[in-house]
Image: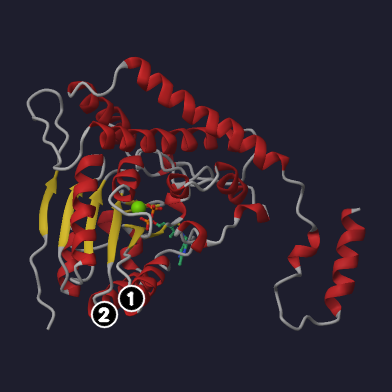
Amino acid sequence: MAQVLPAERDLRRVIGDGDAIPDGEVEGLGEHELLALYRSMVLLRTYDERSVVYHRQGRIGTYAIYWGHEAMQAGAFHALEDDDWVFPSYRESAIGLLRGLPAATILSWWRGHPAGWWNPADYNVASICVPIGTQVPHAAGLAWGKRLRGGTECALVFFGDGATSEGAFHEGANFAAVMRAPVVLLCNNNQWAISTPLSAQTRAEALVDKAAGYGIPGVRVDGRDVLAVYEAVRDGVARARAGEGPTFVEAVSYRAAPHATADDPKAYIDLDRVEEERANECLGRYEGYLRRVGALPDELEQQIKAEAADVMRAGIAAAEAEPPADIGLVFEHALADPPESFASDLAELRRILG
Ligand SMILES: Cc1ncc(C[n+]2csc(CCOP(=O)(O)OP(=O)(O)O)c2C)c(N)n1
Ligand SMILES: [Mg+2]
C-alpha cells in the first residue's frame, strides 16, 4: 500500500551568502569531489555560452539556452554512478558531456546533422527529448525494466515546471510510483514555460506538493545551489537503490535567459527580476563557496576555464569538419517497405539541389 508522505516544502540550501547566511557542508564531499563538481559546471557553462555565440554566427541552429541551470544539472549528475541512466530534455542537451559524450556530437545535434545522434546504451544517456514530458515514462520504464532484471541501476529524469501539466509526466510519475521504479524525478522549476508563468501553470502552492498525489517523497531545493541539489538527488538515488521507489525533487530556479535563441522574453518577463537572478547565478555562487573553503586558487580557476574553452574549440571544429549529410537520408529509415515514388522523389530532389 502506498503511503502518502508530506512533501518537504522548505527550500534546502547548503551554500551561504558569504555574509549572514553561513555555509553548510555535505557529508562525503571532500576537496576532490567539490572540484569535480566545479569542473562539470564550468564545462556546461562554457558549452552554453559558446553555443549562443555559434548560433549568432550561423554555425548551429536554434538552441535552448540553459545558462543558470548548471548547478542542478551537474549536482544531480554527480549523485549518480556510471551505470545509472540520464534522461534529458532539450534543456539538458549537453549533460552527456559529463559522461564523455563528445562536444562535437551534441553540437552536431543542434546543427541537425546525423552525426548528432548516439547510441544511448554507449553512455547511459538517453536521446534528447523535445516533446514535453515524454522522457518521464521512458525513464520510468527503463528503471522498472532494470529492476525486473535484477539490476541496481537507477534513472534520473529532468523535466520542467511546464511538463508537470502534461499527461506524459503524470503517466510516468504514477507508473514509477506504483511499480516502485528506481527513478529520481527532477523538476527544473525555472518558473516559465516559454511565456507561460508558473502562476498560470498550476494552482498547487508548490510543485513538490504533487509528490503526495503519487505517494512518493518530495523534496524542494534551491536549484542554484549545486551542493543542495547533489545532496537531495543522492538521497533519492539511495532510496531508489534500496527498492523504495521514486523521489520527486523540485529544484527551484528562475529562467534568467531567453527560452531559446528564437525567443525574445522582453515581451513578457520582468527584466529587473532577470537582472537580480543573473547577479546571483549558480556558478558565481559556487565559486564564492569554493574560495571561502580555500579550494579554488585563481590559477586553478583559470586553468579549468581554459580547458573547457579548448573542449569547445575542438568540438565545433570537429562538428564543422563533418561532411554534409547525403539528402538520401530524408528517405532512408522512413518506411520498411518504401513506395516506388521514393526513388523518383529523391532523384527530383537531387536534381533541384544540383
Ligand atoms: C508536447 C509538447 N507540447 C508543446 C511543446 C512546445 N514547447 C516547447 S518548450 C515548451 C515549454 C516547456 O516548459 P517547461 O516544461 O517549464 O520547460 P523549460 O523550457 O522551462 O525548461 C513548450 C510548451 C512541445 N515541445 N511539446
Ligand atoms: Mg520551465
Which quarter of the rendering shows the N terminus?
bottom left
Residue 18 drawn at (x, y percent): 14, 24
Residue 212 drawn at (x, y percent): 14, 70
Picture residue at 41% right of the left edge, 71% below the top: 138
User: Is residue 294 positioned above or below 315 on the image?
Assistant: above
The three-letter amino acid code for the residue at tag 2 is: Met
Picture residue at 33% right of the left edge, 49% below the top: 77
Residue 226 drawn at (x, y percent): 26, 40
Numbered label attached to residue 106? none
Residue 188 drawn at (x, y percent): 31, 52
Contact? badges 1 and 2 (CB < 8 Å): yes
Picture residue at 62% right of the left edge, 42% below the top: 60
Determine if residue 44 is in view.
yes
User: Is residue 262 positioned above or below 7 on the image?
Assistant: above
User: Is residue 242 positioned above or below 8 on the image?
Assistant: below
Tell me the residue that label 2 is attached to.
179
N-terminal of the pair, mark 1 or mark 2, is 1
Q: Quadrant of residue 278?
A: top left
| Picture mark count | 2
Left or right: residue 303 versus residue 63 is left
Tell me the residue that label 1 is attached to.
144
Protein image colouring = secondary structure
- Density class for disc 2 (Cα within 10 Å; few <14, some 14-19, many ≥20) is some
- Density class for disc 1 (Cα within 10 Å; few <14, some 14-19, many ≥20) is many
Of the pair 345 and 185, the residue shown nearer to us = 185
Determine if residue 58 is in view.
no
Q: Name the outermost residue toward the front.
A: 150
Picture residue at 23% right of the left edge, 26% below the top: 290
Label 2's element? helix
Quadrant of ligand 1: it is bottom left
